[in-house]
Amino acid sequence: MKIIKTTGLKNRALKQITMLIVFAMILMVAVFYGVLRSRTIRNHSKNQEKSLSNMDAYLTNYFEEVDAIAKNVNYNYYLQNYLGTVIDDENKYTEPSVGKNMRAYEMSSQAFSDTLLSRPDISSIMVFGRKKVLLNKSLYSYRNVVMDYSCLEWYQGAILKPDKMVIVGPERQKFFNTDDATISLSRMIQDYENGSFLGVILISLNMNKITEICDSFLENSTGALAIVNEAGDCVYQEDSDGYMDVKKLDMKKILSSVEKHSENTFYLKYDGTEYLITKKKMESSGWYLINIFPYSSMRADLWKISMLIVAAVAGTLLITLLSMNRILTNVIQPLKKLERHMGRVSLENLNQQVSITTDDEIGHLAGNFNSMLERIENLKEQVVEEQEDKRKYELQALQAQINPHFLYNTLDSIIWMAETQDSNIVAMTEALAKLFRISLNKGNEEILLKKEIEHVRNYLIIQSMRYADKFTYEISVEPEVEKCKIIKLILQPIVENCIYHGIKKKRGSSQIIIKAYREGDLLILKVTDDGCGMSRETCEKILSYEIEQENISGSGIGVKNVNERIQLRFGKEYGLSYESEEGEGTTVTYVLPYCTEEIKNEQ
């Protein structure tokens, strides 16, 4: 037998676990950082795209609102009348002397004036013919400048797109004595009868309203916000958080990069600084709405979070290692005891051998196991048969047992009632007699659910008299399951357990609820109390072999034995299950086959 000397199992396991945990935590930090970075960028992009889309909608609605004014002017009767007269020979007419069209001119001019008074965001409304200004209402003083209007962008756009509004700017109009930049909205005026050209209306908007809309969105945004027209001129640019001076950026260069990228959010490196750019192009004006966020700011926030994660991981690692050391110590110690125990068995001469490759606790366990293998193989069938027979005899004996303490205590209660002439003595005596009658059941192992319920009800009557005001009970049974066939004396032990271990230890009054109903081919019984409850560990041990000799229920028939009786009669798929919470109560669930076969010698 070859033995390889190595370090102790505990030290080896602790070393390997440490390496595994360190690697796992490093990987977890890296993955978490990647996920956090990706999610942060995604959330930032999603929020900014939503904000830009909302801004686009607001600005578009605003331009459409102004365009509605231009459309209404286009269908103004007086304006149509006036323009229809002067457009063909506009050189003959000079403002405001327009001959027979004086009234049409005045009414049109008044309409323009009313619009200016009601809309502070509109600086001027003008109508241009082919060669001259036909109508002018403005907040600025007019400067008679000789120019070819047909060459201007807003004029050409209106002619080329007669059914659409044209938005141009920001720009300074040369025919006004002001340096204020305005946004120009133009539209061609057509004769509504024949569609012929009557002029071009030009509405000049100051920047106040647009700035107001942009500022409102900037408050709920991060980074800088810029609006750039197709020529690369800034309509608006401001920074919300003070991360940077957005006005120092060359927006024409940024616009060039924006137009190259098809995605809405992308990275842009500008003058050695990396930015996260989010864009939205307005269909109405062709402007680009751009959010500019320095990636270094986002990276700094991610770094802070990462440091907190690293600190938490380091603390977790330390606590884990200390815990693992204690756990391994607790695991190895029993193995050493088992080794010493199995060493005594190794003195026997057995044949089969297990290959031993280590000189640690597991190696010793394997050596001792070699000496036990042959004996276990020879005794296995014999032990199984003996244990099965023994269990059957034990279960048969357990079924016939009645808790003497319960009988003694009940008889003592009856004596006390007799001495005090308590009126409940008849009821308790009658309940005790019925209890014993059903328990005997003429020697039959099986009983109707109706009789089992009657048995447990008699038991509850007795106990409720003994423990006055300690608990109440409720029994709910579906009529169709009353004739279902079950094993006798399976409810009373559990109810007894509820009283002695759940309710008796609890202050105040409690309640026991028993339910019986059908689920498909199954009979379901539930016993619920609101007593002290149990821990999860106790629930797991109740039906296990770890507490084989312990009487959990407090009755002559233990909870585990009730479960074994059910499984021995019906199969391993049936039996008991526990649900409990300390301080809240316990629910025991029976799963039984739904069977209504006739029972012989039924009482």
Image: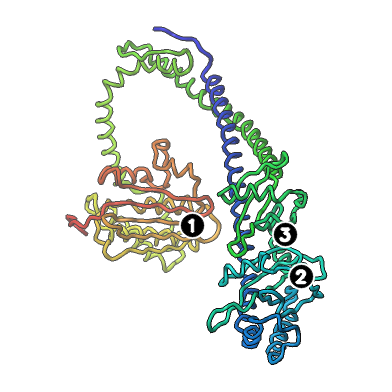
Q: Amino acid at mark 2?
A: Val
Where is the C terminus found, in terms of image quarters? bottom left
| 530 sits to left or right of 199 | left
Name the residue nearer the viewer: 26 or 388. 26
Determine the CA span between mark 1 and mark 3: 68 Å
**Disc 1 designates what residue?**
530
Crowding near the residue tagged with mark 3, few <14, some 14–19, many ≥20 C-alpha atoms within 10 Å: some
Q: Which residue bears the numbered disc 2? A: 146
Which of these two is toward me, 417 or 145? 145
As drawn, 405 above or below 9: below
Report which residue position mark 3 lands on.
Answer: 236
Residue 110 horizontal side relative to residue 374, left or right? right
**Labels 1 & 2 near each other (Cβ < 8 A):** no
Write the residue at 68% across / 39% down.
Answer: 303
Label 1: which secondary element: loop
Work out whether residue 62 or residue 163 is closer to the camera in this orientation and state it: 163
Closer to the observer: label 2 or label 3?
2
Q: Nearer the viewer, mark 1 or mark 3?
A: 3
- Which of disc 2 and disc 1 is earlier in sequence? 2
From where the camera sits, is residue 337 visible?
Answer: yes
Quadrant of the snapshot with the N terminus: top left
Q: Quadrant of residue 197?
A: bottom right
| Badge 3 amino acid | Tyr
Picture coordinates of residue 466 (x, y %)? 45, 59
Q: Secondary structure at mark 2?
A: loop
